Image (cartoon, grey):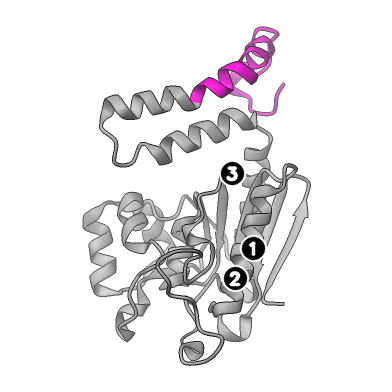
Amino acid sequence: MSVRVEREGPVTTVTIDRPERRNAVDGPTAAALADAFRAFGADDGAAVAVLHGAGGTFCAGADLTAFATERRNRTEPDGDGPLGPTRLRLSKPVIAAVAGHAVAGGLELACWCDLRVADETAVFGVFCRRWGVPLIDGGTVRLPRLIGTSRAMDLVLTGRAVDAAEALDMGLANRVVPAGEALAAAQALAGELAAFPQVCLRSDRASVLDAEGLDEPAALASEFAHGRAALETETQAGAARFAAGAGRGGRFDGA
């Protein structure tokens, strides 16, 4: 199995398990990834997912050795993306746990995630620049939104490697942890997100995503429309907990 899925409580972990190929994704692996995240999206008991790669590498991109075989990645303009889930719009957050290389399509998978927890061995880059392989899993769309057009253009045009420290500085990585700790840190962060009121968390997330490309009045209207569900289902209970003394001193543990 090239993709493994495990769930512990509300946290689902999806693992690309092709270490002999540096977790490069061929067609069957892409399909398995897309199916795994569709299942996560449909699982009412799952709140947050973590994506990582086995064997100390996140993902080296598309498996170019499969390009001219029956294992090739799909390149149709509709349906799943070449790397699998990159065209999915989930209602719940996904965190990338990045160790080693997250390059070419692997960078695009990391950018598809909502947050990126990298360890000190992480390397990001558009390494496919060297082989004439385009970014068609959202890289030219999501990377500029994450780090700005100027920095994204630098990475896209040069294909250069970006280490964990620089990735943190430019906003590509959200957290950097010691080597070997990316998965545990991402799972811990996922547990923290899963403990929040979920209607509110998901509606605020959706508002952030929907605001792209909208003018300010439209974005504000979208934000309010998303927020109504939380106001109607969670806010009263949350306000009552606050009035009763929860959260004093900025605590996040419900006390």
Does residue 99 sit above or below 21 in this rendering? above
Secondary structure category for the residue under label 1: helix
3 or 2: tag closer to the N-terminus: 2
Secondary structure category for the residue under label 3: loop
Q: Nearer the viewer, residue 209 or 55?
A: 209
Query: Residue, x 49% and y 79% (percent of image)?
Result: 73
Which residue has dot 2 on it? 31
Q: Amino acid at mark 1?
A: Asp
* Residue 247 part of the magenta-drawn span: yes
Q: Amino acid at mark 3?
A: Lys
Q: Main secondary structure of the magenta part?
A: helix
| Alpha carbon distance from label 3 to label 1 | 15 Å
Q: Quadrant of residue 168?
A: bottom left
Which residue has dot 1 on it? 35
Where residue 89 appears, as percent x and y from the top left, is 50, 50
Where residue 60 appears, as percent x and y from the top left, is 49, 77
Q: Nearer the viewer, residue 198 or 159?
A: 198
Q: Are marks 3 and 2 in contact (CB under 8 Å)?
A: no
Residue 92's mark?
Answer: 3
Where residue 149 appears, as percent x and y from the top left, is 23, 54
Q: Are marks 2 and 1 in contact (CB under 8 Å)?
A: yes
3 or 1: tag closer to the N-terminus: 1
Secondary structure category for the residue under label 2: helix
Q: Amino acid at mark 2?
A: Ala
